[in-house]
Image (cartoon, helix red, strand yellow):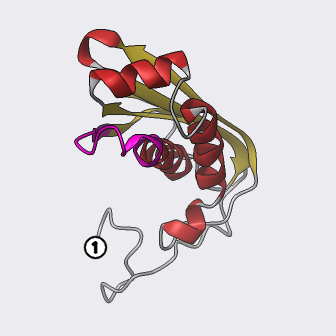
Amino acid sequence: MDGFTHLNENGQANMVDVTGKAETARYARAEGRITVNAAVFTAITEGSAAKGDVLATARIAGIMAAKKTPELIPLCHTLLLNKVSVDFRFEEEKKAVICVCEVRLTGKTGAEMEAMTGVSVALLTIYDMCKAMDKGMVIGNIRLLEKDGGKSGHFLAE
């Protein structure tokens, strides 16, 4: 079972025991994207969507989701998050909205799943708010960009 810390010696699901780990500053940054049609892209970038400010709503949803990660992902530890930010940028030629979520905390574990959960729910919120204009939106490329802290140290995606 080497490498699979969420499995016990019998191969059963197991919450990792972090009792003996030292608290360290932890940071994670994740991103994902949603590709939309031209009408949705314009509504989002101009703030003219019928349901209201899409990005403001998605930002709040992403922050809330990061805070609720252990309720959504089995075996994740409950963490006291010091900072969660959700930001967006646009790729006009591809009609894509890129979401980036950053999470900071001091703890014995965590930050990566919180950042990726924040991105995922922010993008799902964009879909929900714009689905009347485009049911063919595509969410994808959700990934960890960077993490720091803990035993494994610094990671930076290529």
Which residue type carries mark 1? Answer: Met
At x 47%, y 44%, the residue is: 129
Q: Which residues lie in the magenta part?
A: 126-141
Q: Residues within 10 Å of mark 1 (few under 14, many from 20)?
A: few
Q: Give the quadrant of the C terminus.
A: top left
Residue 5 appearing in the image: yes
Q: Secondary structure at mark 1?
A: loop
Of the 4 image quadrants, the one containing the N terminus is: bottom left
Q: Nearer the viewer, residue 96 or 18?
A: 96
Instruction: Please identify the quarter of the rendering in which residue 141 is found.
Output: top left
Residue 20 is left or right of residue 48, and the answer is: right
Farthest residue, direction top = 93
Residue 31 is left or right of residue 103, and the answer is left
Left/right of residue 92 with respect to residue 128 in the rendered view? left
Residue at point 46%, 40% (across, down):
126
Q: Point out residue 37 in the picture as x, y percentages from the top left corner.
A: 27, 27
User: Which residue carries the number 1 mark?
Assistant: 1
Q: Residue at x 44, y 49 (%)?
A: 128
Report if residue 154 is visible in the image: no
Q: Please, which residue is most extreme toward the front here?
A: 50
